[in-house]
Image (spheres, grey):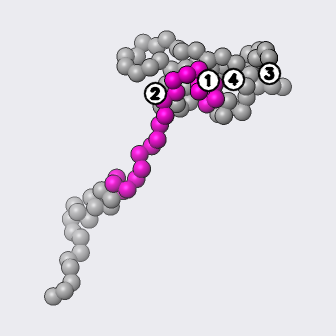
């Protein structure tokens, strides 16, 4: 009389997925448009001192070219070369390289 029927069939599977997609926040991405922003991202990722940042030429169509940032690691033999996406501000690639010279102040 006053009872409702339990969820059946495909609705039983799709309803939780639908609720998650409605309630789940979208991943926040912020573009990285200046060399200073790219350096700050690389420094926070590596805990080093960003020395240079310049755009990388690439063959892919669409979007902005990524940033190449060299990071000096004080007291170490190796530093980092980071590729930072201009579209999302995320580190795309990070690899060890011979330590670049420190910034001159």
Where disc 3 sits, the SS reads loop
Q: Which of marks 1 and 3 is in front?
A: 1
- Give the residue at mark 1: 36
Q: What is the distance, in whole Å, between disc 3 and disc 4 at their CAs?
A: 15 Å
- Of circles 1 and 2, the one toward us is 1
C-alpha gap between disc 1 and disc 4:
9 Å
Mark 1 vs mark 2: which is more N-terminal? Answer: 1
In the image, residue 92 lies at what x, y percent? 53, 28
Against 78, residue 45 (above or below) is: below
Give the mark nearest the N terminus, 3 or 2: 3
- Give the label on residue 87, or none: 2
Which residue is found at the position 69% from the left and 23% from the top? 50
For mark 3, what is the residue?
77
Foreground mark, 3 or 4? 4
Point 24% across, 75% down: residue: 6
Mark 4 in CB contact with mark 2 (< 8 angstroms): no
Label 3, label 2: how far apart the Cα atoms are: 32 Å
Q: How dense is the environment of label 3, judged by Cα within 10 Å: few (below 14), some, or many (20 and up)?
A: few
Tell which tag, 3 or 2, sits nearer the viewer: 2
Residue 47 visible in rendering: yes
In front: 25, or 15? 25
Q: What element carries label 1?
A: helix
Report the span colored magenta.
20-42
**Image position of 101 (left or right of 65):** right
Specify whether 52 is left or right of 8.
Answer: right
């Amino acid at each position: 009389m006053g009872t409702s029927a339990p969820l059946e069939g495909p609705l039983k599977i799709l309803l939780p997925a639908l609720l998650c997609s409605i309630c789940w926040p979208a991943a926040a991405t912020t573009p990285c448009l200046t060399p200073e922003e790219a350096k700050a991202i690389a420094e926070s990722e590596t805990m080093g001192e960003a020395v240079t940042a310049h755009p990388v030429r690439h063959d892919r169509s669409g979007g902005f070219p990524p940033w190449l940032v060299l990071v000096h690691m004080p007291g170490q033999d190796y530093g980092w070369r980071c590729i930072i996406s201009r579209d999302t501000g995320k580190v795309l690639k990070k690899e060890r390289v011979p330590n670049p010279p420190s910034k001159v102040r």
